[in-house]
Each structure stands twice: as structure tokens, then as C-alpha cells.
């Protein structure tokens, strides 16, 4: 198979959209590429392009019958190129291998933010070019002139985002010595033309990054690496999984810097339990890279189809601008365009209306300090959100929980929170808040998770499920699930554990059945929690059953008799030895 470089292939597509299987000259090529690439076009590259296309078998060359010095060109039709072009239906393994190579390039030296932005821009650019070519051909077929077709094909109606020539990947990478400047300019223009991308793609400073020769070379290698494959044909699920791979790969290192990455298996468990439906509002008040929202979307998509998943209203808020940018890009890569992701401190300035969400999911910062009564009272809607009390300055766990409860609908709203195990039993202000919430019959289920699931702590953690207006059969009751033994070893991180599909299924089914299972889960009346001073520590209510050792009595009896026989033989020999020694000593006297 003849390998076709991506820059050659992309220009072939442009020329095909202009000429189809008709004849054209070199001057025609110059005109088309100049119109499409604008100021980035260099006529010096045309000869190299025609040579590469001919070598790859994409181009037929003839001499002009009227002037033998003049060449006439024809393109081979796209449907005949399958044996010549690289395979483009990338698998998860292909993309993960690509991401691994990128990660190896920047490991410990460069922020992985640059990988995420490059992948995002490559996807957007590749998709835009395909959409342009399709629209251009349709416009020509409708009788428009080439200039009119070009203008029509650039219309935003055909594209997810507005791109100018300088934003297109192949134009950016044309001059290796100006990569940093070109990326900086392209991302700035992309953000200006698409307000929803402001503060998302234009955050990374490529010029500052490439000030050192080493970093410039890393950037060059990253660009060439991602230029090897076209990303427009990759499904959102596969490309999204590759994007998630980058986040997961760097999670252990970023955990040391305070970034929180919730293992996707933990999110899958929560989503499986709380079961979002089409048309519902799903909200994450500290959404990070968007895992709770994305997995909720995928859950609905797998059960009801992608059209129904599109009816989910996904909303979130994130205080860190850089992490919010990751979230926005991650959502787009997964094919989710209309999520509402706000920027700001949620505990002080929530950007979504109270009581609007059917389902609230979050893994807030555990034991976050600095949110005592004086601070929280400076925020918006504090009376409505913190009506059960104020947390101490040392831990905002129950402030987060109260905020989540306030955001859930009064009728049937569900809340799932991943939280530090200590908030289940600590006293003081937290204990008082916990007592009031339990007495309000809002706690539905408490799950003790296995230890070593999280990248930033070895502590086991817990999931608490709250529900407004519980079903009648669950009123006045709390289900405790001890899932401390439900884990497998993490497949890639030696010191961590993970949840298998079987673990997730067992825990989720126990929640849905809401019944006692010896050593695993127990339904407890609020009276019992009250008698335990509102302590929600799972091990207080259910402990794993220790499997006793099975004893074969007959076998043990036979072994015991054999041991007794051996003891008697040894005693007899010892007695004989002592007698001989005594006799020997008597003879010497």
C-alpha cells in the first residue's frame, strides 16, 4: 500500500471538490488552493503536491495536445482510492496508542493541556474540511459558480464551529518554524468567531511554551504525530474514550497538584443506581472534566438511543477556568454540544436556579476548608441552601451536600455524592447537620466503597444517595451497603483498586432491591440511626461475613492419631537414649 501523507490527502479532497474527474492545469490548482488557504498558501508547494499525488496514484498526467510542454491533470475518483489510502476507521486501540505516544513525548515536561487542545483542534478542523467539501460539491451541483459555492460552503449552517483558513490544521502546520505563533493566532481567532469557545481553546500560551528549543521540538513532534491520522471519521464514543484516556493517564500526577479525577467506574456505579432518563436535568456543581455528565449521557444513549440522549439537559459549574475548559472540550469530543457549563465558585455563587434538577451528581473536594458560616453568608441564596446549618472552617462536606439537596427538585429529585467517609460520623456542626437531614428522611442509601479507588487518596470514601419524597416503601428507612470487598486490582496503576462490571452490577442491584443481604447490605429504620446518635458509618450496621474454614473431621482425626503415634515413638526412643546414657555414666564410676 502506498502511504499518503495527510497534507497531500487534504489537498486532494479540496481539488476533487473543485474539479471532480474533470481536467485541469497547474494554474487551476494554484487558483483553488489560494482561494481556500488564503494568506497561508505558498505557490512553491504546488509542484511538490502534484509530484506526491502522482507518486501515490492519485493523479493522472497527460500532455496538452496543442502544447506538449503543458501538462493536463485528472484526479482518480475517491471510490477507487481505498487500496491506496491509509485505513481511517480508527479503533479504540489505535487512538489509545496514538495518545500514549503523545503522552510519552510530554511526560513530566509539559502540561497535558496541550495534548487536549491539539486533539480538539484537529477534530474540529478535520470535520470542518469534510463538511466544506460536501457543501461545496452540492453547491456546484445546484448551479452556483465556484466563488459562490466557496462562500456557501463556508456558511456556519454546515459546521459545528466557524473556522477561517488560518484555523485549519494543515495551514497551521505548514511552516514548522512558526508553529507556536500559528497555533496561538488560530486559537485566538477560533475563540473570537465562536463565543462558546472563549476561555476554552485560547487559554494555552503556545508562544510562551515554545520559547525553549526543547519545547518547540516537542510541539513539532506532537503536531506531526496527530497529523498522521484524520479524526473526522472517528465516532464520538471512540474519540471520547481516547480523550478520557489522557485525563486518566495523567490523573496520578495531577492528583498531587490538587486536581480531582473521579474514576469512571465509580461514576458508572452512581449513574447505574440513579438511572437518568430522557428529558431530565442532570447537574454537577463541581463538574471537573465532565465525567458525571458524559456518563449520564452515555447511560441514556445505551438504553434509549442517541436521539433520546439528546433530550437530557446537562448542566454543571466549575471554579477552575482551566478544568472548565477541559470539560467543554471533553463534552464536544463526546459529541455533546449543548451542555450548560458555568464558571464560578458554586458554594458562594451558584449559576443555576434552585430546585431545577431531577438528578444531582458530584464528587466535591473532600474536606475543603475555608467555608465557615461567615464565608457562606456572603454567598447567594445562603438561607435557602444551608437551612440545616453551617459547616466548620475545616470541612465543607455538608455544605456541598446541602447545596446539592437545594438544587434537586422537591418532588422526586435524586442526589448522589461521592464523599469522605469521615463525614458519616464526625460530630460537632457536621453531626448536627447530619441529624437534621436524617430526621427529614432525605437519606436513602449509604455505601462504603473499597479503599484505594481514588488517585488522590487511599481512603475508601463513601457514596450517599439522597431522595426527596422517597417511595412509600422506603420512607423512614436507610439502606447501608458495605462494598469494601467489591473490587479488583487496577489494570494499569499498581497501587490502586478498581470496580469491575460485576462489582458495579452487584452494588447497583442491591440498591434497587433495597433488601437485607447478610454481610453485604441492611435496611435500617431511622430509629436505629437515632439510637446510634445519627452515626452513618456503614460498619456500624453491616460487616462482611468472614468465611469460616471448612474442617474435615475424619481427616483431622486420622492426622491427630498419626501425630500421637509419632509422639509415642519419639518418647520411646528418647527414653531408650536416656537409659543408655545413665548406664554409661554408671560404668565409668
Image (tube, rainbow, N blue to C red):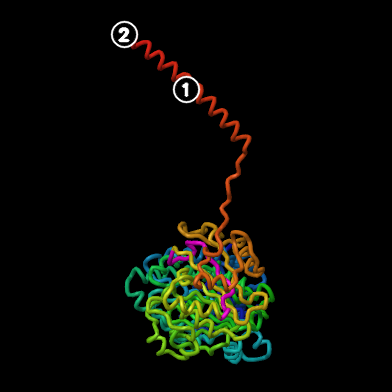
Residue 176 painted magenta? no
Q: Earlier in the sequence, mark 2 or mark 1?
A: 1
Q: Is residue 502 above or below residue 356?
A: above
Q: Percent position (x, y) of residue 569? A: 50, 21
Magenta span of residues: 440-457
The residue beneath circle 1 is 571
- Look at the image and tell me whether residue 138 can be seen: yes
Horizontal arrangement in the rendering, residue 288 relative to residue 524 (left or right): left
Q: Which mark is residue 90?
A: none
**Tag count:** 2
The residue lying toward the viewer, choosing from 143 and 331, is: 331
Horizontal arrangement in the rendering, residue 447 relative to residue 576 (left or right): right
Q: Percent position (x, y) of residue 312? A: 62, 82
Quarter of the figure with the C terminus: top left
Q: Are marks 2 and 1 in contact (CB under 8 Å)?
A: no
Q: Quadrant of residue 155?
A: bottom right
Element under disc 1: helix
Which residue corresponds to the image point at 56% horizontal and 28% vertical from the top-left? 562
- Look at the image and tell me whether residue 60 can be seen: no
Q: Is residue 536 above or below residue 138?
A: above
Q: Quadrant of residue 514?
A: bottom right
Circle 2 Cα neighbour tier, 10 Å, few/some/many (<14 / 14–19 / ≥20): few
Which residue corresponds to the image point at 38% horizontal and 77% vertical from the top-left? 369
Which residue corresponds to the image point at 67% horizontal and 91% vertical from the top-left? 143
The residue beneath circle 2 is 588
Q: CA distance from mark 2 to mark 1?
A: 26 Å
Q: Percent position (x, y) of residue 97? A: 52, 63
Identity of the residue furthest to the left in this view? 589
Circle 1 Cα neighbour tier, 10 Å, few/some/many (<14 / 14–19 / ≥20): few
Which residue corresponds to the image point at 41% horizontal and 89% vertical from the top-left? 377
Q: Percent position (x, y) of residue 566? A: 52, 25
Amino acid at each position: 500500500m502506498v502511504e499518503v501523507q495527510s497534507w497531500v490527502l487534504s489537498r486532494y479532497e479540496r481539488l476533487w471538490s473543485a474539479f471532480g474527474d474533470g481536467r485541469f492545469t497547474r494554474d487551476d490548482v494554484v487558483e483553488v488552493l489560494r482561494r481556500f488557504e488564503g494568506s497561508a498558501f505558498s505557490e512553491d508547494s504546488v509542484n511538490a503536491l502534484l509530484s506526491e499525488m502522482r507518486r501515490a496514484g492519485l493523479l493522472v498526467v497527460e500532455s496538452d495536445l496543442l502544447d506538449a510542454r503543458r501538462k493536463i491533470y485528472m484526479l482518480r475518483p475517491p471510490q477507487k482510492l481505498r487500496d491506496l489510502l491509509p485505513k481511517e476507521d480508527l479503533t479504540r486501540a489505535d487512538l489509545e496508542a496514538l495518545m500514549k505516544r503523545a503522552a510519552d513525548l510530554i511526560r513530566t515536561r509539559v502540561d497535558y493541556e496541550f495534548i487536549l487542545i491539539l486533539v480538539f483542534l484537529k477534530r474540529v478542523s478535520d470535520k470542518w474540511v469534510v463538511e466544506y467539501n460536501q457543501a461545496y460539491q452540492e453547491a456546484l451541483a445546484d448551479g452556483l459558480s465556484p466563488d459562490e459555492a466557496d462562500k456557501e460552503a463556508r456558511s456556519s449552517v454546515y459546521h459545528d464551529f466557524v473556522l477561517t483558513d488560518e484555523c485549519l490544521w494543515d495551514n497551521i502546520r505548514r511552516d514548522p518554524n512558526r508553529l507556536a505563533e500559528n497555533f496561538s493566532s488560530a486559537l485566538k481567532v477560533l475563540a473570537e468567531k465562536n463565543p462558546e469557545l472563549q476561555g476554552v481553546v485560547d487559554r494555552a500560551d503556545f508562544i510562551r511554551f515554545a520559547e525553549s528549543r526543547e519545547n518547540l521540538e516537542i510541539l513539532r513532534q506532537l503536531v506531526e504525530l496527530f497529523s498522521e491520522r484524520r479524526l473526522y471519521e472517528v465516532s464520538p464514543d471512540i474519540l471520547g474514550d481516547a480523550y478520557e484516556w489522557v485525563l486518566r493517564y495523567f490523573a496520578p500526577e495531577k492528583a498531587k497538584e490538587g486536581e480531582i479525577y473521579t474514576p469512571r467506574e465509580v461514576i458508572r456505579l452512581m449513574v447505574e443506581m440513579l438511572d437518568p432518563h430522557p428529558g431530565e436535568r442532570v447537574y454537577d456543581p463541581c463538574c471537573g472534566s465532565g465525567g458525571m455528565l458524559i456518563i449520564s449521557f452515555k447511560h441514556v444513549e445505551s438504553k434509549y438511543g442517541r436521539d433520546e440522549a439528546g433530550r437530557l439537559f446537562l448542566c454543571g459549574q466549575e471554579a477552575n477556568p482551566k478544568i472548565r475548559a477541559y470539560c467543554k472540550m471533553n463534552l464536544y469530543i463526546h459529541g455533546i454540544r449543548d451542555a450548560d457549563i458555568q464558571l464560578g465558585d458554586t458554594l458562594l455563587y451558584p449559576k443555576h436556579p434552585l430546585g431545577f434538577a431531577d438528578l444531582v451528581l458530584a464528587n466535591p473536594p473532600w474536606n475543603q476548608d475555608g467555608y465557615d458560616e461567615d464565608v457562606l453568608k456572603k454567598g447567594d441564596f445562603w438561607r435557602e441552601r444551608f437551612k440545616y446549618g453551617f459547616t466548620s472552617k475545616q470541612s465543607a462536606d455538608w455544605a456541598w451536600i446541602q447545596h446539592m439537596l437545594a438544587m434537586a427538585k422537591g418532588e422526586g429529585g435524586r442526589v448522589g455524592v461521592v464523599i469522605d467517609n469521615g463525614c458519616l460520623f464526625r460530630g460537632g456542626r457536621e453531626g448536627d447537620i447530619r441529624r437534621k437531614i436524617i430526621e427529614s428522611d432525605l437519606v436513602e442509601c449509604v455505601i462504603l466503597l473499597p479503599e484505594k479507588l481514588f488517585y488522590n487518596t487511599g481512603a475508601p470514601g463513601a457514596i450517599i444517595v439522597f431522595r426527596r419524597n422517597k417511595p412509600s416503601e422506603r420512607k423512614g428507612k436507610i439502606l447501608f451497603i458495605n462494598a469494601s470487598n467489591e473490587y479488583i486490582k487496577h489494570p494499569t496503576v499498581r497501587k490502586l483498586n478498581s470496580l469491575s462490571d460485576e462489582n458495579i452490577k452487584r452494588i447497583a442491584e442491591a440498591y434497587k432491591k433495597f433488601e437485607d443481604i447478610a454481610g453485604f447490605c441492611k435496611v435500617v429504620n431511622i430509629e436505629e440511626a437515632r439510637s446510634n446518635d445519627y452515626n452513618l458509618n456503614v460498619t456500624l450496621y453491616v460487616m462482611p461475613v468472614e468465611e469460616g474454614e471448612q474442617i474435615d473431621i475424619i481427616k483431622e482425626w486420622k492426622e491427630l492419631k498419626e501425630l500421637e503415634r509419632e509422639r509415642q515413638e519419639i518418647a520411646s526412643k528418647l527414653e531408650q537414649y536416656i537409659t543408655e546414657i545413665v548406664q554409661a555414666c554408671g560404668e565409668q564410676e
